[in-house]
């Protein structure tokens, strides 16, 4: 007997239009009515996940931040497994030699470590992962890009 269904968001629960199809919502509700617990498991932050699920009221649990946080259907944090300041600093310093932006989810924002150019590039590349056919200009004009950018904060490397 199936007791839990857990679904990723990007490329699984969300279609190419970054929406959950009506028939998928119906299937989730049918499963829940049959006593099956539905969960969303994603690398996104809770706020990032909720942006895509606005108005659906799925009444599900969430595993967000690639497992760093577990929330109940009310959005309350049940468990949080965070990095210490020292670990965040260590990771950022190791990656300093690479032209990438490090992303940390904390609270309402996604904090990206890197130069302004690296952070900008990381946002575009993040979106390109799921919208391969769109060029940079299309991405930068999209609502998704504007939302990701608004929910991102750039920070410099920490210093002790």
Image (cartoon, rainbow, N blue to C red):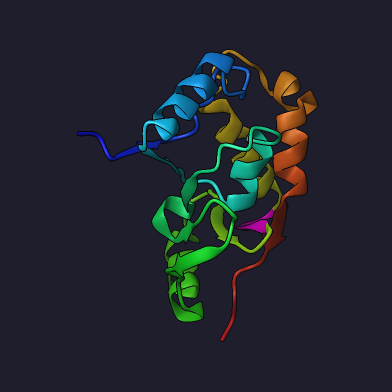
Q: Is residue 69 left or right of residue 21?
A: left
**Does the magenta-highlighted stretch encompass residue 114?**
yes
Residue 11 visible in image: no
- In depth, the one of 66 and 1 nearer the eye is 1
Majority secondary structure of magenta residues: strand
- The residue lying furthest to the front in this view is 34
- The residue lying furthest to the left in this view is 1
Residue 146 found in image quarter: top right
Residue at left offset 69%, top offset 59%: 108
Residue at left offset 59%, top offset 55%: 74
Q: Is residue 109 above or below residue 22?
A: below
Q: Give the percent coordinates (x, y) of residue 31.
A: 40, 29
Q: Is residue 50 above or below residue 33?
A: below
**Does the magenta-highlighted stretch encompass residue 1?**
no
Q: Give the percent coordinates (x, y) of residue 130.
A: 53, 25
Q: Is residue 71 above or below residue 50?
A: below
Q: Is residue 138 above or below residue 70?
A: above
Residue range in magenta is 109-115
| Total numbered badges shown on the rendered structure | 0
Residue 134 visible in image: yes
User: Quarter of the image containing the N terminus?
Assistant: top left
Q: Give the percent coordinates (x, y) of residue 149.
A: 74, 44
Residue at left offset 58%, top offset 51%: 46
Residue at left offset 45%, top offset 72%: 83
Residue 5 found in image quarter: top left
Q: Give the percent coordinates (x, y) of residue 125.
A: 57, 34
User: Quarter of the image containing the C terminus?
Assistant: bottom right
Q: Is residue 70 left or right of residue 155?
A: left
């Amino acid at each position: 007997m199936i007791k839990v269904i857990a679904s990723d968001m990007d490329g699984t629960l969300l279609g190419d239009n970054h929406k959950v199809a009506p028939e998928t919502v119906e299937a989730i509700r049918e499963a829940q009515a049959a006593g099956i617990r539905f969960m969303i498991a994603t690398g996104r932050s809770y706020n990032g996940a909720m942006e895509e699920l606005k108005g659906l009221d799925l009444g599900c649990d969430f595993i967000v931040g690639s497992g760093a946080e577990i929330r109940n259907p009310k959005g309350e944090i049940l468990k949080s497994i965070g990095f210490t300041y020292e670990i965040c600093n260590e990771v950022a310093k190791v990656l300093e030699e690479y032209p990438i932006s490090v992303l940390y989810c904390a609270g309402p924002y996604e904090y990206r470590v890197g130069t302004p150019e690296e952070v900008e590039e990381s946002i575009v590349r993040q979106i390109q992962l799921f919208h391969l056919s769109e060029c940079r200009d299309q991405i930068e004009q999209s609502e998704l890009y504007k939302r990701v950018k608004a929910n991102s904060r750039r920070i410099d490397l920490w210093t002790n």
